[in-house]
Image: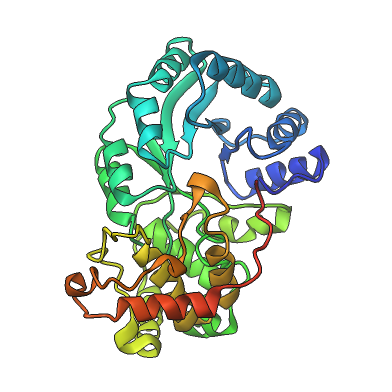
Amino acid sequence: MRALGSADQMTEVVEAAVQAEINHLETAPAYGPAEDFLGQALQRSRRRPDGGWVITSKLLPGISFEQGRRQLRGILERLQCERLDNLAVHGLNRPEHLHWAEKGEGRALLEWAMESNLVDQVGFSSHGSQRLIAEALDVELFTFCSLHLHLLDPQRLPLARRALDRGMGVLAISPADKGGRLQAPSAQLIEDCWPIAPLELAYRYLLSQGISSLTVGASQASDLQLASQLAQRCGPLNPEEQQCIRTLEERRGHRLGAELCGQCQACLPCPSEVPIPELLRLRNLALGHDLIEFSQERYNLIGRAGHWWEELDASACDGCGDCLPRCPNQLPIPQLLADTHGRLKATPRRRLWG
């Protein structure tokens, strides 16, 4: 989704991916000209991974059966291939999306795609709630999932383990950028993870959990250097890595003190539908590791990204106090939400997509 300057740029990245022992390409019609450029790159590239490429693309939920058939054929035409290894529902983020895929026209579409031998397996990506993802994992049709799994936000790891235990494939969405812009970390985060670079520690953390597919948003060949270095390092964390993660957590806890949100989600549901844990997570990152730019970017995307992100920011809290008796750490949640809004509210920035 990032090597979009030209087919030449995409070819450079694809050839570097082979060199880095990467064999999985994940794309989508929503990523501008990505599929066109990728199809050209696959034809131009002089090298292929051992065993060939594994290719994933995606279709947005809610479309009709006929729209889906046309769109899938368009994907195959752009990629210049006869079939896909994986087809995902792109953004199974709301209950109506799950209903579409499980019982509506989406079910018929996904079953047709496999029965027509155009797709080997179907799954989903989700930016939705943990409850929704858990329900989606129970849908027999899905055999893989793509989830937000991050070193600095490991809430969905139990869901990933549940999927792995069932034999499902699991892909970590954007462990670098959405994981805290770890490709450009704050000086404080670098110090907190020392002597291991934050991005390397994040990748190793997920690999050690059994997550063997991590998305790497490469726009140039050099972006794949770290992936190449980690290709054979999927085992448990070594003692140095374990100590770095302990230090990271200890320093975050020290800086936030009694105001650290433990992300237990006991405060939910909020009568005003404020996404309390997610907002306080951004506060944790801003104060715990000086990830101000990332936290502001995510905070000011609220309400501007449709079903891909939260719709209400901390200003929606009316101070009712309904959450207070449910917080095991007795956090002054309304005051922390007001502080979050004051710290992070800024001029909105343009999204990469949309």
The image shows residue 174, relative to residue 263, as above or below, that is: above
Outermost residue, top side? 116
The image shows residue 56, relative to residue 270, as above or below, that is: above
With 120 as the anchor, is 330 left or right in this view? left
Q: Identify the residue at image location x=65%, y=34%.
A: 48
Q: Identify the residue at image location x=33%, y=25%.
A: 102
Q: Position of residue 315 (x, y in %)?
A: 46, 69
Q: Is residue 123 visible?
A: yes
Q: Position of residue 168 (x, y in %)?
A: 33, 37
With 270 as the anchor, is 175 left or right in this view? right
Q: Is residue 240 visible?
A: no
The image shows residue 119, relative to residue 309, as above or below, that is: above
Colour basis: rainbow
Where residue 41 sits, quadrant-wise, is: top right
Where residue 326 sits, quadrant-wise, is: bottom left
Depth order, front residue of 314/107: 314
Q: Position of residue 324 (x, y in %)?
A: 22, 74
| Total count of labels | 0
